[in-house]
Amino acid sequence: MKDLRHPIPKWVTSGKTIRQLIEELQTFENQDMPVRMSLDDGATHHGISLVMKRVNALCLLINSEHYYENGWQDSMDGQLPDA
């Protein structure tokens, strides 16, 4: 890990609750705008494929492109064509 000269603010690493996220999204005038997620300050971004509840403790926003480009393709190769 990189040695930091200044501590990262807690709001950066703690994330948002569902309530906080909904409140922030409701401030957008265009509620039909696509939602994307990025892990590199917006340099790249991906659509949200699924919203999942995990063990009643986390809400996960998931992008499934990698699965459908790889594992799903392999599983479909083994499928019989529709009759």
Image (cartoon, rainbow, N blue to C red):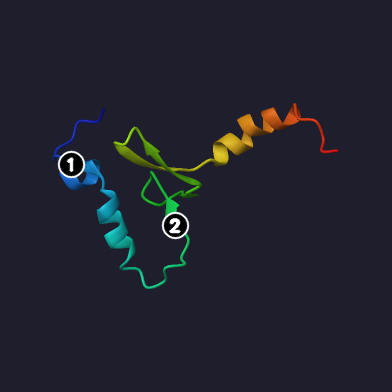
Residue, x 18% and y 35% (percent of image)? 4
Q: Is residue 56 left or right of residue 77?
A: left
Q: CA distance from mark 2 to mark 1?
A: 26 Å
- Residue furthest out toward the left: 6
Q: Mark 2 or mark 1: which comes first in sequence? A: 1
Q: In which image quadrant can residue 72 be found?
A: top right
Marks 2, 1: nearer the viewer: 2
Helix, strand or loop for disc 2: loop
Q: What residue is disc 1 on?
A: 8
Q: Can you say whether 44 is above or below 1 in the image?
A: below
Return the residue nearer the eye: 46 or 83: 83
- Indicate left or right for 58 with 36 as reference: left
Q: Can residue 9 be seen at all in this image of the molecule? A: no
Dividing the picture into quadrants, the one containing residue 70 is top right
Three-letter code for the amino acid on which mark 1 is drawn: Ile
Q: Is 22 in front, or is 3?
A: 22
Q: Position of residue 54 (x, y in %)?
A: 37, 35
Q: Is residue 27 visible?
A: yes
Q: Residues within 10 Å of mark 1 (few under 14, many from 20)?
A: few
Rendered residue at 51%/47% (across/down): 49
Identify the mark at residue 35; answer none if there is no mark.
2
Q: Quadrant of the C terminus?
A: top right
> Horizontal and vertical percent for residue 57?
29, 36
- Amino acid beneath label 2: Val
Residue at image location 71% in from the left, 32% down from the top: 76
Mark 2, Cα crowd under 10 Å, few <14 / some 14-19 / many 20+, is: few
